[in-house]
Image (tube, rainbow, N blue to C red):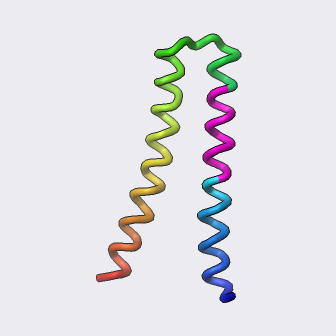
Amino acid sequence: MEVELFEELMMTVLVGGLVLFMAFIVWDLAKKSKAGRFGTMILFLALGLGVLGFIIKSFVIAGLEGV
């Protein structure tokens, strides 16, 4: 396995794991602070926008490399 392929694979896997861990932290924070349904939605919306940005960046980079 080439180093570049390994780095790309590990970046995707480890960032995905980090996102899941952050989702757990946000859920725990919402639960402990008694944020309610609306507050929990807002917290996850903020996290979701960050994740969406990471996914969009991956598609943009793949699109530019294909051109």
The image quarter containing residue 58 is: bottom left
Q: Is residue 32 above or below residue 5?
A: above
Horizontally, residue 25 falls left or right of residue 44, namely right
| Image quarter hosting the N terminus | bottom right
| Image quarter hosting the C terminus | bottom left
| x then y, percent, for residue 43 | 52, 27
Residue 26 lies in the magenta stretch: yes
User: Outermost residue toward the left?
Assistant: 67
The residue sitting at 48% across, 55% down in the picture is 54
The image quarter containing residue 13 is: bottom right
**Could you tell me how many numbered marks the image carries?**
0
User: Outermost residue toward the bottom?
Assistant: 2
| x then y, percent, for residue 63 | 33, 73
| x then y, percent, for residue 46 | 48, 34
Q: Is residue 1 above or below residue 21?
A: below
The residue sitting at 34% across, 81% down in the picture is 66
The image quarter containing residue 62 is: bottom left
Secondary structure character of the magenta stretch overall: helix
The residue sitting at 61% across, 81% down in the picture is 5
Question: Residue 37 or 60: which is nearer the viewer?
Answer: 37
Question: Residue 50 or 1: which is nearer the viewer?
Answer: 1
Q: Is residue 12 above or below residue 35?
A: below
Instruction: Please provide the residue range marked out in magenta.
Output: 17-27
